[in-house]
Image (tube, grey):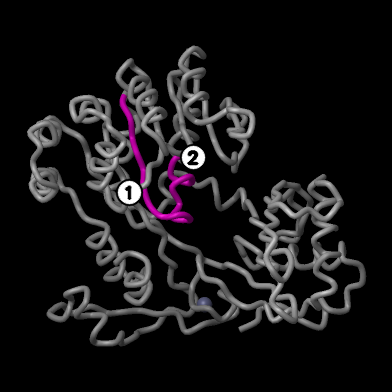
């Protein structure tokens, strides 16, 4: 499926025009990443839209690829010389948005040398998609209330997990953005890699591992900057975790992400990082897991009968559900989907959960305790959204299972 007019692009003349045309069309279509890569005998351009990669059907002769790579390097102020090493940079330029006006778009460039030539990835940092309000994340009323309650606590930590591209940064941004607007003035500082959105009232910093400005070093320094609220892009090691937990226990609100598959998985991950149960169970206010699932296009949504085995996999064979699916229309470029919504699992840390962790009870036991205060798994949240006609069972199997 192509959403681009191939002739139009191919007729553009210079490599810079070509690059700008591709970015312009990608931006309009809501593409998050543009992949320009060298195959054995030709170049290939693909797009990631709503999490899926599609072929663009734009031809790029292999001998043109170095010219395209060079014009991108110029745009990103990188050395024009061909490098044998991976390179990355960023640039911003004005592109036309869906309202017909021009908007400054930030683009992150990554060039990776492969055996056939450069593999180039352009990440379009779409500011209007990165910054959502908490109400726009896709949470149902109960989850939203829980998140608001947790994020408003004056100290303690919230950890969010989920695979790459599951919307963790958007969730953290929505929280700190809301907190930055509060009447009660707070000093908010972030450590990010990369900074994906520039806030006016928040002090944001970019991690530079090459010069030793790591998350751990940044965290150590931030504690001397008198913060009330700290956002850390990611906790990858025990040292960063220890500083972050110390900040949370000493009266700061800390928000970060961590590698785990579920809210309850956060506990095992912190134990792996050699953090004492007594320490993290008191420092944490909540652990959140999330996924992003494609939203059915409301303009072409229609009744749908999913494959029986999919229904059985989710254990829904005895339920009477009006399944929906988008037929594909001009509103959604024929895909049947428009945007994505978050699927969430929120584990609130209360005294019973803390005791269960310290008593080394099993994950099943901890979940049973959490259920008493309304805990729902990712799959339970996803099934509610299938029943609402927001998302498809097919996508839930792909993304949430
Ligand atoms: Zn549609």
State left or right for residue 309 relative to residue 106: left
Q: Nearer the viewer, residue 126 or 267?
A: 267
Asked if residue 95 is positioned above or below residue 211 in the image, the reply reads below
| Pointer 1 with pointer 2, Cβ within 8 A | no
Point out residue 19 in the picture as x, y percentages from the top left corner: 80, 64
Indicate whether residue 19 is drawn in magenta.
no
- Please report the residue visible at 63 percent of the width from the left and 51 percent of the height from the top: 125
Q: Distance between the Cα atoms at labels 1 and 2?
A: 20 Å
What residue does disc 2 label? Answer: 173
Residue 98 visible? The answer is no
Mark in front: 1 vs 2: 1
Residue 393 visible? The answer is yes
Q: Nearer the viewer, residue 122 or 137?
A: 122
State left or right for residue 5 relative to residue 368: right
Q: Which mark is drawn over residue 260?
A: 1
The image shows a total of numbered marks equal to 2
At mark 2, the secondary structure is helix
At label 1, counting other C-alpha atoms closer than 10 Å, the crowd grade (few under 14, some 14-19, many 20 or more) is some
Point out residue 317 in the picture as x, y percentages from the top left corner: 16, 81
Asked if residue 349 is positioned above or below residue 25 in the image, the reply reads above
Point out residue 94 in the picture as x, y percentages from the top left corner: 78, 52
Mark 1 Cβ and ligand 1 under 8 Å apart: no
Indicate whether residue 165 is drawn in magenta.
yes
**Magenta extent:** 156-173
Q: Quadrant of residue 1?
A: bottom right
- Please report the residue visible at 24 percent of the width from the left and 43 percent of the height from the top: 268
Q: Quadrant of residue 247?
A: top left
Q: Quadrant of residue 67?
A: bottom right
Q: Earlier in the sequence, mark 1 or mark 2?
A: 2
């Amino acid at each position: 499926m192509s959403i681009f007019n191939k002739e139009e692009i191919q007729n553009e003349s210079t490599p810079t025009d070509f690059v700008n045309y591709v970015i312009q069309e990608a931006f309009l279509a809501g593409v998050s990443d543009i992949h320009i890569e060298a195959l054995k005998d030709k170049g290939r351009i693909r797009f990631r839209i709503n999490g899926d990669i599609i072929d663009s059907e734009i031809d790029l002769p292999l001998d043109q690829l170095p010219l395209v790579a060079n014009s991108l390097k110029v745009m990103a102020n990188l050395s024009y010389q061909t490098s044998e090493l991976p390179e990355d940079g960023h640039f911003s330029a004005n592109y036309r948005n869906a309202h017909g006006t021009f908007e400054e778009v930030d683009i992150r460039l990554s060039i990776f040398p492969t055996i056939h030539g450069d593999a180039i990835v352009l990440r379009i940092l779409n500011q209007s998609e990165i910054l959502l309000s908490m109400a726009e994340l896709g949470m149902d009323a109960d989850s939203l209330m829980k998140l608001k309650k947790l994020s408003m606590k004056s100290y303690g930590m919230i950890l969010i997990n989920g695979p790459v591209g599951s919307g963790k940064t958007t969730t953290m941004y929505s929280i700190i953005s809301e907190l930055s607007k509060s009447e009660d003035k707070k000093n908010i500082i972030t450590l990010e890699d990369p900074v994906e959105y520039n806030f006016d009232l928040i002090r944001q910093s970019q991690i530079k591992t090459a010069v030793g400005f790591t998350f751990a070093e940044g965290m150590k320094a931030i504690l001397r900057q008198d913060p009330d609220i700290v956002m850390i892009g990611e906790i990858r090691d025990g040292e960063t975790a220890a500083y972050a937990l110390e900040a949370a226990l000493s009266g700061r609100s800390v928000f970060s992400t961590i590698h785990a598959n579920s809210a309850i998985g956060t506990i095992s991950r912190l134990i792996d990082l050699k953090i004492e149960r007594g320490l993290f169970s008191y420092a944490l206010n909540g652990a959140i897991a999330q996924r992003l699932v494609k939203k059915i296009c409301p303009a072409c949504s229609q009744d749908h009968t999913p494959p029986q085995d999919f229904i059985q996999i989710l254990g829904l064979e005895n339920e009477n559900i009006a399944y929906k699916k988008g037929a594909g229309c001009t509103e959604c470029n024929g895909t049947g989907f428009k945007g994505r919504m978050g699927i969430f699992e929120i584990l609130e840390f209360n005294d019973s959960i803390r005791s269960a962790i310290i008593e080394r009870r099993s994950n099943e036991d901890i979940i049973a305790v959490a259920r008493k205060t309304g805990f729902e798994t990712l799959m339970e949240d996803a099934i509610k959204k299938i029943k609402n006609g927001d998302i498809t069972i097919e996508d839930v199997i792909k993304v949430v299972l």
